[in-house]
Image (cartoon, rainbow, N blue to C red):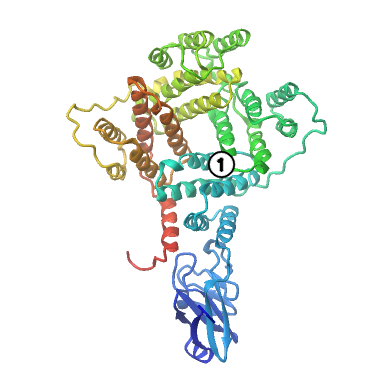
Amino acid sequence: MNGWIQAGTVEKLREQGPKLVKGGIVVFYHEDEVHALDNRCPHLGFPLHMGSLCNGILTCHWHHARFDVCSGGTLDPWADDVPVHDITVHDGEIWVNPNCRNGNQVQLYKDRLLSGLEQNIGLVIAKAIVGLMEAGVPEKEIVAIGIKFGVKQRRQGWGSGLTTLTAMANVLPKLDKQGRILALYQGLLHTARDSAGSGTRFLLDPLPNTSVSEERLMEWYRDCIEVRDTRGAERVLLTAVQAGMDEMRLFSMMSMAATDHFYINGGHTLDFHNKAFESLKYVGDEQFNDVLASLVPMFGSASRSEELHSWQSPVNLVQPLMEAFEELSNTGVSSGVGDSCTDDEELLQALLGDDPLRTVHVLKEALLGGASPVRIAQIAALAAAERVVRFHTQNDFGDWIAVLHTFTHAHAVHEGLIRSADPWLVRGIFHTAATIYLDRFLNIPAAPRPAVSDAVGEAPQPAELLELLDKQQQVAPAAAWVTRYLRSGGEPEPLFNVLGHALLREDAEFHSFQMYEAAVAEYDRWASESGPFAEKACETLILAVTRYLAAHAPTSRETPHTAKIAWRLHRGEKLFEEE
């Protein structure tokens, strides 16, 4: 019995009751059989030798979780299964295998993660993530499990949960290890919650005829979306995939339909498309159809902003945009991604101005003059971030989401134009410009940009920001702190890690995850440039995300507490004892 643990005799075990042995294992004698289990309740670690064993069921006395003493399986899924150890008896002596029965721990954790997603049990999800991370499993594999689950197990298709998961996967390089665990947990938990109570999504078959031209398929897809025929659109989409249409062309087809109408679903539709295509780098080819098809259902009841009164009165924004689109379509626009042919500051001020007709004219002339659509979209995203920076706290609290929607939509347009040079997507720039104009009243009065004296001194420690955000109504102080940090030479990398923790330690709402990820992505684009305009753009994006997160903190922080419990359980800490 090399390596096995001697656990005494059967006779003594029967007389004296449960016995603890090396390695945190408890041995029971029950109904003429011997059983060995991990002594820590998998729920919160309470000692199982202090529980009750009756009729083959071991009950933990802390939260009354019940376990089959033979297999370790729980009757209460929120508690998770308890690891079981093999035993053998020789001449009355009990020997216990120190290694639990489940040999492949990585596969066990993956199975537990999937079970946690299916049952929407946060602690099970968190423990699986910690186990996988500690086992060295690539984060991409963990993300892929969540995406595969989400696109199949949500009948309504792509939603906020999968968007959160993809956004958090994108920002993992900005975070330390604890931050990455929290980011994965938040993303996967939101995916589980978003899918809870929904049914499995079954895809339709492609059309039998795959010899239809790509142009005809694109036309059919747009026609189906126009009349909200999501089932027809799904078959056309899957036919296009089966016919071999490449990813860029598929994005062009789908984003074209998403911009045929104005600012669909308050900007979420285009943002969801952007995130779904970003998620493809985390999953295999076998998930390609499921991911893309999950985008179609949202068109069935999508709002179309050109139908809204605010887009038609007191200033008619619809007609000027339609006329601009027609002229751009007839003349054509540049597909370049290089330097712009327009003045960045002039364009930024036009976007932030109160004359929407002039803004439309400036955008149109810039595009007709050969300016890069990507650059214009980047500046539009910066203008949207400036709206967040100028958002005054005397506005209604719910209006934070209005400026957030504009910013994330602008970011999606920017990323979409980087992905595809399709001229139809430039319409999204104009949709962004219109919403930036409509948000102008949320900047009246404008929140002042923090002023910092010339003698800024040494940069404060990034962790100080977390202490500041332990209190409510710290929007202005947090912005001032960040400005002082940057002006005194503070490095952005530690700051983004701390901002990530400021987000992930809260019971954050979906939009906060969008804000952080979009700001990080836009910041990285500007940080690759030099010059005063790019430097101020970087500061604007950091101020925008700081102010938004500060406005939504603190919360009760229940979600990260669950992740902390999972981490402590994995380390073998005793949660039932005082820290």
Q: Is residue 420 above or below residue 462?
A: above
Q: Residue at label 1?
A: 162
229 vs 74, left or right, is right
In the image, residue 454 sits, relative to residue 351, either above or below, namely below
Q: As drawn, which residue projects farthest toward the left?
A: 455
> In the rendered image, which quarter contains the C terminus?
bottom left
Question: Which residue is at 82% across, 33% downward?
Answer: 208
Seen as rendered, the residue at the extreme front is 2
Question: Which type of secondary structure does the marked residue at label 1 adopt?
Answer: helix
Give the percent coordinates (x, y) of residue 133: 48, 54
Q: Quadrant of the N terminus?
A: bottom right
Q: Is residue 6 above or below residue 116?
A: below
Q: Quadrant of residue 158?
A: top right
> Where is residue 565 drawn, in percent x and y?
42, 59
Residue 555 position in % (x across, y down): 38, 46
Q: Quadrant of residue 481?
A: top left
The count of marks equals 1
In-image side of 62 versus 456 (left or right): right
Label 1 crowd bin: few (<14), some (14–19), many (20+), radius 10 Å: many
Of residues 243 and 166, which is closer to you in this image? 243
Q: How far across and how far down the image is residue 150, in percent?
A: 60, 45
Q: Amino acid at mark 1?
A: Leu
Q: Residue at x 58, y 82 (%)?
A: 88
As rendered, which of 263 and 222 lies closer to the eye? Answer: 222
Residue 306, above or below 97: above
**Left or right, 21 with reference to 88:** left
